[in-house]
Amino acid sequence: MKTYTYDRLLHWSECDPAGIVFFPHYARWMVEGLNEMFLKLGVDPNGPRGESARGGLPVLGLSMKFLSAPALHETVTHRVSITKVGGTSIGVTHQFLRGEALLMEAEETRVWAEHPLNNPRELRTQPVPDTVRALLEQTE
């Protein structure tokens, strides 16, 4: 399955007073990393879906496990790995590393969905398109 990796610097605004990353930032980084992976694959998961809907990848489930904390100004590697592509859902593992040391690991399930433009609060799950499935199931 597809894996995407990139490095990011831990900024002052992302830390608590002790200089340790404030944990909700991990969730933001997971969204950013997954979206960046999709965009690099040529897929905008939040883009238009025809003339009457806009896409989305809402979270259905999330589990986070913290092992060690990065410190201010450290470079953290974020590894996004697709673990499953179901009918309408996508399983994703996120690993945050300092070198080879695992700092945090998260498992999430997202659904391929769309929001009708005439009612953006409505959410409809959709089958993962075959073209997207093929991209996510590629091995490196």
Image (cartoon, rainbow, N blue to C red):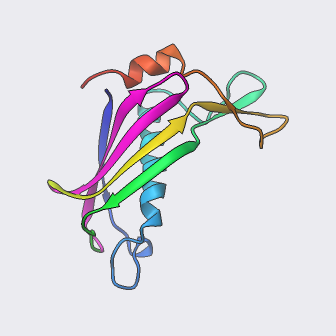
Which residue sits furthest bottom? 17
Q: Does residue 62 lie above or below 39 as drawn?
A: below
Q: Residue at x 35, y 47 (%)?
A: 94
Q: Is 87 a magenta residue?
A: yes
Find the magenta span and give its range.
Answer: 72-99
Q: Quadrant of the C terminus?
A: top left
Q: Residue 2 location in percent, x, y?
A: 33, 29
Above-or-below relation of 109 to 15:
above
Residue in front for this viewpoint, 84 or 120 = 84
User: Relative to the observer, which residue lies in front, 52 or 63?
Assistant: 63
Quadrant of the frame with the N terminus? top left
On screen, residue 88 above or below 18: above
- Residue placed at 37% from the left, 71% from the top? 21
Q: Residue at x 36, y 22 (%)?
A: 137
Between 62 and 5, which is closer to the camera in this rendering? 62
Left or right for 130, reference 94 = right
